[in-house]
């Protein structure tokens, strides 16, 4: 819950406060829970509403550059990495993405890899962070994310695709440097 709240507010301390406020609201409002969604979705919806309100109160303006990035006009994956239309496997990877764990020290590198993934996720715009954290870190279903964040299914897919593409490119860049050494 703290990770999701953190994507709306500026500090971890404020995110912790939002989580505490959420639990208080859940306890106070439990008698009003109507079973129209799962309990988890209901709790996270309360969290999102409280975190969003707190984030707006903390920071009244958002720079336009954080909302629209320069990369949105470019494809998320270089089209040259796919086989051309004339081949039998058009649209498939021409060279598949490199594997991240080819070294024998897999367990030792796992912590570093998790840190790299967390760093790549933290560089994303807030909405993409929220969607990738809920889908890939927390394991939520697409419908739960849509309901929890109040976004459409199509928007959720676009945000998740862009977020995954960014994380993938950061990981490939890092591990191509490691292999080159």
Image (cartoon, helix red, strand yellow):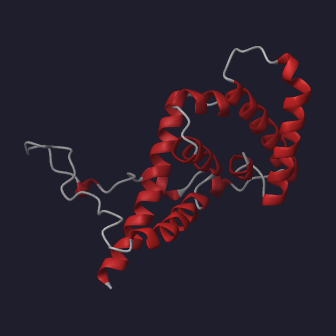
Report the front residue among 158 and 138.
138
- State which quadrant residue 127 falls in: top right
- Judged left or right of residue 172, residue 95 is left
Q: Residue at x 77, y 38 (%)?
A: 47
- State which quadrant residue 151 falls in: top right
Q: Which residue is drawn at 50% across and 43% down?
A: 160
Report the front residue among 30 and 73.
30
- Judged left or right of residue 100, residue 50 is right
Q: Which residue is drawn at 16% across and 50% down?
A: 83
The quadrant of the rendering that contains the N terminus is: top right
Q: Can residue 28 be seen in this view?
A: yes
Q: Is residue 104 above or below residue 17?
A: below
Q: Which residue is drawn at 50% across and 50% down?
A: 163
Number of numbered discs present? 0
Residue sitting at the far bottom: 181
Q: Where is residue 137 in the image (x, y as percent from the top left)?
A: 55, 48
Q: Position of residue 16 (x, y in %)?
A: 82, 52
Q: Is residue 35 above or below residue 7?
A: above
- Judged left or right of residue 56, residue 96 is left
- Judged left or right of residue 121, residue 9 is right
Report the front residue among 6 and 99.
99
Q: Position of residue 15 (x, y in %)?
A: 80, 52
Q: Can residue 56 be seen in this view?
A: no
């Amino acid at each position: 819950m703290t990770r999701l709240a953190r994507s709306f507010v500026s500090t971890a301390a404020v995110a912790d406060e939002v989580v505490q406020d959420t639990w208080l609201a859940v306890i106070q409002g439990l008698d009003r829970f109507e079973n129209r969604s799962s309990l988890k979705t209901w709790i996270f919806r309360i969290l999102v509403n409280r975190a969003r309100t707190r984030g707006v109160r903390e920071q009244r303006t958002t720079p336009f550059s954080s909302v629209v990035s320069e990369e949105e006009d470019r494809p998320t994956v270089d089209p040259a990495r796919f086989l051309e239309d004339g081949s039998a496997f058009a649209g498939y990877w021409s060279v598949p993405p490199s594997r991240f764990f080819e070294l024998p020290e897999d367990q030792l590198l796992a912590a570093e890899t998790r840190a790299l993934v967390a760093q790549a996720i933290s560089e994303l715009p807030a909405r993409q962070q929220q969607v990738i954290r809920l889908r890939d870190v927390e394991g939520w279903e697409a419908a739960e994310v849509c309901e929890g964040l109040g976004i459409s299914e199509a928007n959720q897919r676009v945000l998740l695709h862009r977020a995954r593409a960014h994380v993938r490119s950061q990981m490939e860049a890092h591990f191509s440097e490691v292999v080159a050494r």
